[in-house]
Image (spheres, rainbow, N blue to C red):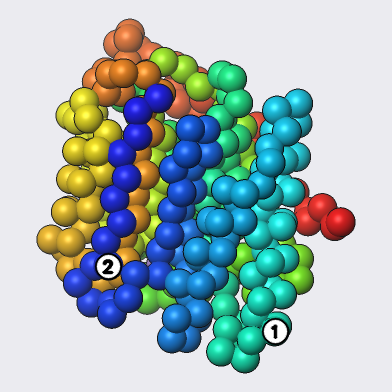
Amino acid sequence: MRVGVRTDIGKVRRSNQDNYCVTRRLFAVADGMGGSRAGEVASALAVESLESHVFDDSSPERSLLEAINEANRRIYELAAQRPEYAGMGTTLTAAFFADDTVFIGHVGDSRAYLVTNGSITQVTNDHSIVGELFRAGSLTEEEAMNHPQRNLLIQALGTDERVSAEVHRARVSIDDAFVLCTDGLSSLVSSEEIRDTLMVNDDPQKAADDLTEMALERGGHDNITVVVIYALPGAPALEPAVEDAIPLEESVSFESRLCGAAVD
Ligand code: MN
């Protein structure tokens, strides 16, 4: 696997409350929220907690859920102890690779995309009001990107005692590429543009830089964080191998489900 990563404060915000982690098999982005420094603390704690979790290879999906629940608990408890952190929270989108399978877990509106065979799929469902309207077909992607209420989350990590993380699983193929990003990117750069950027870049770091620059050129109204993962040495394949390739819905086999918080 080859990986590129970039985080940027953007052009408007006075601090960068995004965090990320890039390890051999575990990748994540987190977008903190809360007054003063609370958002930074929440996203840093989410990432730290995830990184320190010991993953069990015999049950990677359960491990990932436990890691997310543990991060939720740690943020929630710290927020309860320290008045300056009251109400802090964060998004968390994490990808854990186990053999030929990737497990993607998330809470909030930071996204994971899969680019394969010249197509891009948004793996995660934004846990936001606007995300629900988009899934219901009430908004186009462009309308969702520009919606004034796009920041209203349905759930975040650390704001409640329990959280319902969503976990997706997919078999990883040689040409696959994955993108994890915060809304500072996805609210300014469309999924099609993300796909195009990956397909012309052999180097995942260059892809991460190009995507970030695109968001900055369009105003950079929020912190921007992007992790680009190429499963194998080359860039994602430019075109489907055959002209009349199977429609995406049929070719990508995601198993998705909502998981209730596993209470310790
Ligand atoms: Mn953000």
In the rendered view, would you say 210 is above or below 32?
Answer: above
Image quarter (top left, top right, bottom left or bottom right) of the C terminus = bottom right
Amino acid type at image mark 2: Ile
Task: Tell me the element at label 1.
Answer: helix
Query: Residue at coordinates 44% horizontally, 43% vertically from top-left?
Result: 22
Task: Tell me the element at label 2.
Answer: loop
Q: Residue furthest right?
A: 264
Image quarter (top left, top right, bottom left or bottom right) of the N terminus = top left
In primary-sequence order, the first of circles 1 and 2 is 2
Q: Is residue 62 visible?
A: yes
Query: Residue at coordinates 35% horizontally, 28% vertically from top-left?
Result: 2
Query: Residue at coordinates 43% horizontally, 59% vertically from top-left?
Result: 19
Q: Which mark is residue 9?
A: 2
Q: Residue furthest top?
A: 242
The residue pinned by badge 1 equals 81
Q: Ligand 1: which quarter? A: bottom left
